[in-house]
Each structure stands twice: as structure tokens, then as C-alpha cells.
């Protein structure tokens, strides 16, 4: 087989494989630069109930808003621990962190104490209404829940980071980088 045929076969095989393999979301549906939908949700901080308002949080500085599928699942617990460890760093840059789930919403108080280590607010999104506005939903056992998506939102409501990936490992660093970039350009 000559080089041209080999190259054509390789390209064709790669194209067929890319169509056959399922794709994990590598992006969030609301793009960078879009206006973040405002919302109020019931939540908890350190196990204590509260009402979280995006508008009120943005009045204090950038907000790291991360959606997660289900409290106490392996990936969501890892992500909560990582965000808890990074919360002081976000605060030093003037940003706050809030986690939102459409999953087992009745467990957010306990999740905020144990897995979020009393560091940041966790809010319940029954029926995935807010997750739908942010276009970050998925199905688990026939139920619509929030997909694993991180946003960084500037005080003017513009989205600075929009990142969806089911793997929790990279969310914190991507969010921190976006907050650092915003802070450097607004100090």
C-alpha cells in the first residue's frame, strides 16, 4: 500500500472511531461572556440553613459556582473536599464559592458540614431548574440532575469560566486560574 492510501486509511479510521466513541462534555453550554442567570436557592453553610442569592454574592466579588450531580457520591465528595481546601485561596482573591446540586437535595445540610467542611455554601436545586437555566443537566436513573460544571462569574454577571467535565480533578485549578486572571486585571 502506498503512503497516500495508508494516510487516507488512518484518517478514515480515526474519523470512524471519533464517531463511535461517546464523548464526555468538554464544555458547558453557557459560554464565556454570556450573562449568568440570577437565582435564589435554599442552602446550607456549616449545616445551618440559609438562602443563597447570586446577586447578593456578586455584590461582594466574583463567584465560583459549581454544579455537582449527587451529594456523598465519590466524585462529588472529592470535588467538595478540593473546593473546601481551596476556599481560603478564593477568599484571598475576593471570590466566594457555592456548590449547587439537583441530586439528593435533602442532604445538603449534612454535606455542607461533612464534605464541604463548613467552608462554603451548598444550595439545593430541586427539579434542576437552575441547572437547566445554566444548561448543565444530565440523567441519572431517569432523574434530571445537575452535571459537573464549574463557572466563574464576574461581579457584573458575565461568565469568565465555563467548564464541564465529569472528572472532578481539574475543576478547582481551572476556577482558580480564572479568578486569578480576573483579580490581576481588576486590582
Image: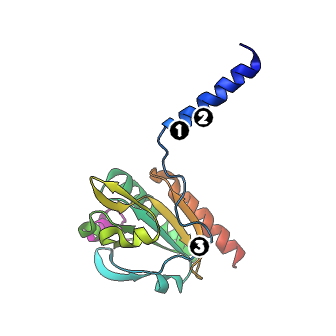
Regarding residue 104, the answer to whether it shows in the image is: yes
Do tag 3 and tag 2 residues touch (Cβ < 8 Å)?
Answer: no
Q: Nearer the viewer, mark 3 or mark 2?
A: 2
Tell me, what colour scheme is on the image?
rainbow
Residue 169: image x %, image y %? 48, 51
Q: Tell me if mark 2 has few (under 14), some (14-19) or many (20+) residues whose alpha carbon lies within 10 angstroms of its own.
A: few
Q: Nearer the viewer, residue 109 or 100?
A: 100
Q: Residue furthest top?
A: 1
In the rendering, which numbered label is found on residue 34? 3
In the rendering, which numbered label is found on residue 69? none
Q: Tell me if mark 3 has few (under 14), some (14-19) or many (20+) residues whose alpha carbon lies within 10 angstroms of its own.
A: few
Within the image, what quadrant is residue 153 found in? bottom right
Q: Residue at x 52, y 82 (%)?
A: 58
The residue wearing badge 2 is 15
Residue 180: image x %, image y %? 64, 68
**Which SS class for mark 3?**
loop
Residue 12: image x %, image y %? 63, 29
Assign the magenta stretch its main secondary structure: helix
Do tag 2 and tag 1 residues touch (Cβ < 8 Å)?
Answer: yes
**Which SS class for mark 2?**
helix
The alpha-carbon separation of the residues under discs 3 and 1 comes to: 30 Å
Left or right of residue 118: residue 28: right
In the rendering, which numbered label is found on residue 19? 1
* In the rendered image, the vertical position of residue 81 relative to residue 91, given as above or below: above
**Which SS class for mark 1?**
helix
The alpha-carbon separation of the residues under discs 2 and 1 comes to: 6 Å
Residue range in magenta is: 109-118
Q: Residue at x 58, y 66 (%)?
A: 31
The alpha-carbon separation of the residues under discs 3 and 2 comes to: 32 Å
Residue 154: image x %, image y %? 59, 77
Regarding residue 120, the answer to whether it shows in the image is: no
Q: Tag 1 or tag 3, which sits nearer the N-term?
A: 1
Amino acid at each position: 500500500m502506498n503512503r497516500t492510501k495508508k494516510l487516507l486509511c488512518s484518517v478514515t479510521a480515526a474519523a470512524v472511531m471519533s464517531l463511535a466513541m461517546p464523548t464526555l462534555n468538554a464544555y458547558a453550554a453557557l459560554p464565556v461572556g454570556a450573562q449568568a442567570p440570577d437565582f435564589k436557592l435554599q442552602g446550607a453553610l456549616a449545616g445551618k440553613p440559609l438562602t443563597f442569592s447570586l446577586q447578593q454574592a456578586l455584590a461582594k466579588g466574583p463567584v465560583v459556582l459549581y454544579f455537582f450531580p449527587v451529594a456523598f457520591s465519590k466524585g462529588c465528595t472529592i470535588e467538595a473536599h478540593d473546593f473546601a481546601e481551596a476556599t481560603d485561596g478564593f477568599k484571598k482573591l475576593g471570590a466566594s464559592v457555592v456548590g449547587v446540586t439537583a441530586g439528593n437535595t435533602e442532604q445538603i445540610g449534612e454535606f455542607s458540614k461533612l464534605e464541604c467542611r463548613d467552608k462554603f455554601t451548598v444550595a439545593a436545586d430541586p427539579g434542576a431548574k437552575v441547572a437547566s437555566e445554566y444548561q448543565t443537566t444530565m440523567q441519572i436513573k431517569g432523574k434530571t440532575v445537575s452535571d459537573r460544571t464549574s463557572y466563574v462569574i464576574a461581579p457584573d454577571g458575565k461568565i469568565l469560566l465555563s467548564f464541564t467535565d465529569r472528572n472532578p480533578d481539574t475543576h478547582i485549578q481551572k476556577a482558580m486560574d480564572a479568578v486569578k486572571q480576573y483579580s490581576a486585571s481588576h486590582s
